[in-house]
Amino acid sequence: MKVIGLIAGMSWESSAVYYQVINEEVKHRLGGHHSARIAMFSVDFQDLLNAHDGRGWPAVAELAVDAAQRLARAGAEGLVICTNTVHKVAPEVEAAVDLPLIHIADAAAEAIKAQGLKTVGLLGTRFTLTEGFYRHRLKDRHGLRVLVPEPADIELVNSCIYDELVLGQIKDSSRREFQRIIEALAGLGAEGVILGCTEIPLLIKQEDSRIPLFDTTTIHALAAVDWALGED
């Protein structure tokens, strides 16, 4: 079993889910008292927000690269960035350490293609929805058509993520808004919707939607287990 390196803390609310899902899946597959071999470096999320607000993505890249290098020194054999948005700086992380990176968008795309879907909606932070690093990877590498919400709904989703979910606040009113947005994406032709922020699955579950939802937290964690056990 290879050692999974988790770049965590963005936010810790969803990083805790990664740790749980990975260990539960390893126990399920191997039985007995097995658990995963994990090295985790959890950043101070406030430091990351301050870095981005102060110097933008280069500063975020520095923090992510520092975490990756610490994990490499700790014995990690592969990396998982436990957030969708910070995959914006995945190329910088990959260039800084000689370790494979399990990319969250690739894991999501494989799950979508396994269901035979071609057109999906995407929910996430403003950065994930408006910048090309995530949508273009899904399109260019996997041939998926990706739909995003209207601008006002992008801001609503972004606000819910940063003002509620990363703080552990789960509100029924926000769940209803997300359900409305998912229905709107379905009306535009989405056959399923990617929950492209690792906090969103804390709020929205499959039972809240009539079309398939792709929980990137769980999907990414399971992809990490596939890799660690040589099943990728």
Image (tube, helix red, strand yellow):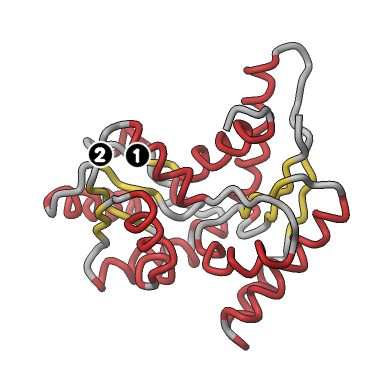
Task: Tell me the quadrant of the picture where the N terminus can be found.
Answer: top right
Would residue 72 appear left or right of 90 to someone viewing this image?
right
Residue sitting at 23 percent across and 44 percent down? 118
Residue 40 percent location from the top left of the image: 77, 49
Q: Mark 2 falls on what kind of element? A: loop
Q: Which residue lies under the disc numbered 2?
A: 117
Q: Is residue 153 left or right of residue 186?
A: right
Q: How many numbered marks, from 0 up?
A: 2
Residue, far top: 32
The answer to whether the residues at label 2 and label 1 have Cβ atoms under 8 Å apart is yes
| Quadrant assignment, res 66 | bottom right
Q: Residue at x 63, y 74 (%)?
A: 60
Tell me the kind of residue under disc 2.
Leu
Rendered image quadrant of residue 59: bottom right
Q: Give SS at disc 1.
A: helix
Q: Is residue 190 above or below residue 54?
A: above
The picture places residue 220, in percent across and down from the top left corner, at: 54, 42
Query: In the rendered image, which quarter is residue 63 located in?
Result: bottom right
The residue to which callout 1 is attached is 112
183 horizontally vs 230: left or right: left
Q: Position of residue 116 (x, y in %)?
A: 26, 34
Of the pair 158 and 57, the residue shown nearer to us:
57
Horizontal and vertical percent for residue 174? Answer: 35, 55
- The residue type indicated by label 1 comes to Ile
The crowd level at tag 1 (other Cα within 10 Å; few <14, some 14-19, many 20+) is many
Local crowd at mark 2 within 10 Å, few (<14), some, or many (≥20)? some
